[in-house]
Amino acid sequence: MNSELIDFTEALIHGFCDDFYHDDSVLHEATSYALKAKGKRVRAQLCLLACKAMGGSQKDGARAALAVEMIHAYSLVHDDLPCLDNDDLRRGQPTTHVKYGDDFALLAGDALLTDAFQVLAGVEFGVLGSKLARPSSEQVQKFTAELASAAGGRGMVAGQSSDVYWTAKKGGSLEVLQEIHQRKTAYLMAAACSMGAISAGANPGDVGKLKEFGMNLGMAFQVIDDLIDGEAGIGKTPGKDAESGKLTYVSLLGREKAEELAKKYTQTAKALLESIGEKSEGLSQLTEWLLNRKY
Ligand code: GRG
């Protein structure tokens, strides 16, 4: 974890909410509540560090970092709704629907999803102006393609959908589980990395390399998520996945093999960074931290 980047991301998020979700409507309150809730900000860190690895500044990477956290926050709000995972606790606080009702939580998620693309489009936001670089039209086009394909009906939404389907069927295989998590978790992390590289004006080869790094890191992240599911202090209801009969790496492989798999993905991710050189040191440290994370 990079506390400087977390602070930078928190300031971005707070500045954006103050500027954009500033009226006293329930919608704006619920949307800010969901986005400001203290998460690990892993996707923003990935984006900012990938941008740095390609020679860009925090200002260059900030827009994509904010947008990817908005998409992630929307996915958590919708995932927690009673019609999906039905969870009461997220990021150590009551979920958005518990606090504001299912209707406003649904709408807050919709707002975050849509407004993320406005952020990417290069719009200026009040006090945030000095923190966000203006992207070129080519960058806007690339950002949109990366984020929409990672999050949409062939990406995260498709992963969530397979998850719902197989949880109801109480079946599935390792192959199904891999497909669910590639789409549900890894694609967005990969997009965080590719957008960070695009923010810095990286060439397509390097963008592709960082995207592949993000895929491997995302898969490691998910296996570790399954490993820590049963533990208290993770900010969400412990043991929820196991209890609901969800397919997990631990239920399919056992703890030992799941740990090995997480290490394997981590090693592949780190090997991809080696070819980038010392500017990717921050990404390497974050990868190591994620392997050993406890929440
Ligand atoms: C509702 C379309 C739709 C998708 C939801 C991401 C997702 C898809 C659901 C979240 C369920 C979940 C717990 C998945 C496991 C991996 C994951 C994305 C964990 C949460 O990410 P963290 O740990 O969260 O980075 P913080 O709160 O730290 O940002």
Image (cartoon, helix red, strand yellow):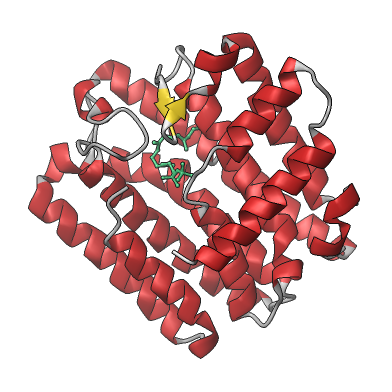
Tally of numbered discs: 0
- Give x and y (percent) for residue 57: 71, 75
Please, is residue 9 above or below residue 200 in the view? above
- Give x and y (percent) for residue 194: 61, 64
| Camera sees residue 93 | yes
- Give x and y (percent) for residue 289: 34, 65
- Residue at 30% across / 45% down in the picture? 225
| Camera sees residue 152 | no
Where in the image, quadrant-wise, is ligand 1 located?
Answer: top left
Q: Nearer the viewer, residue 141 or 67?
A: 67
Please, is residue 10 above or below residue 245 in the view? below
- Residue at 59% across / 31% down in the picture? 34
Corner quadrant of residue 226? top left
Corner quadrant of residue 152? top right
Say left or right for 199 vs 176.
right
Say left or right for 22 vs 151.
right
Q: Nearer the viewer, residue 264 or 283?
A: 283
- Residue at 11% across / 48% down in the picture? 255
Instruction: Identify the image quadrant of the N terminus.
Output: bottom left
- Residue at 32% across / 46% down in the picture? 178
Q: Nearer the viewer, residue 82 or 187?
A: 82
Please, is residue 247 above or below residue 264 in the view? above
Say left or right for 204 vs 185.
right
Please, is residue 283 above or below residue 3 in the view? below
